[in-house]
Image: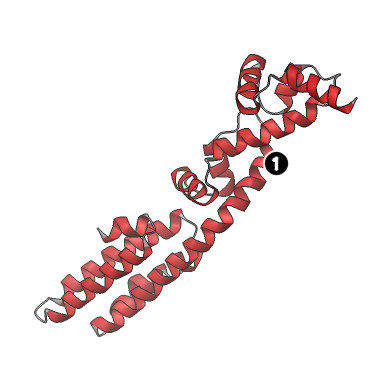
Amino acid sequence: MLANLIRHKRRQEAMALFERIYREIAQCEATPPEVVRNLYCQIVFCLLSAAESRQVTGVTAQGDYLLYTAAKQQTLAQLWEALGKAMQEYFQATERNCQDIVTRVDAYLAGHYSDSALTVQNVAAGLGFVHTYLCSAYKKHAGITINQKLTQLRMERAKQLLADPSRKLYMVAHEVGYTDGKYFVKLFTKEVGLSPKLYRENMICYEE
């Protein structure tokens, strides 16, 4: 249960459960020390795994300390304090990372939108994230998916290119990352509300 809350960044619920586990162990004086340390290590492994997938270096760098040094604390309170600090740092860092993720993804898309082979997996690999986490974090904070943002960028660039009447439609399609001209026309019409041809004609009429 706690592992799932950590992985899904549900901070309040995770910390509440963490505190409850501590209270229950503290009240049960007969709990063997090896059981406590085993539980501690399980939580540490889960925390380090989640931190690694989200590039929370402040926590992953504490791996040896949490597993070997902090684990040797003499009291339950000291043991739990060390783990509690690491959990707080993890959640604070993931919240900061999520805000930064939108900016980083947008910048990456802006520099690679013309690549017809670009995928969400490519974006994640290029930024060093697990793609499932990146998709979830981006949508949560941007309100749209990465693919939707990519389409928006491509359509906006296509509008700019259509202002040049010498550019053939298939050329525009290729320049914004679509190898299939017919698919580009269909998608542009859906997103913009006009076909590329009509959009260009309207631009020319407006400029005149």
Q: Which residue is mark 1?
A: 111
Q: Is residue 102 left or right of residue 157?
A: left
Q: Which percent across, then down, holds residue 152?
A: 64, 35
SS category of the residue bearing label 1: helix
Q: Is residue 96 left or right of residue 198?
A: left
Q: Which percent across, then down, holds residue 31?
A: 12, 76
Is residue 159 visible in this depiction of the protein? yes
Query: Depth check: 171 or 192 in front?
Result: 192
Q: Check disc 1 and give the amino acid type.
A: Gly
For residue 5, which quarter of the picture? bottom left
Query: Depth check: 130 or 8 in front?
Result: 8
Residue at 71% x, 34% y is 156
Residue at 24% x, 85% y is 75
Q: Which percent across, then down, holds residue 199?
A: 74, 22
Q: Which percent across, then down, holds residue 39?
A: 22, 67
Residue at 30% x, 76% y is 71
The relative height of residue 153 versus residue 162 in the rendered view (above or below) is below
Query: Depth check: 146 or 93 in front?
Result: 146
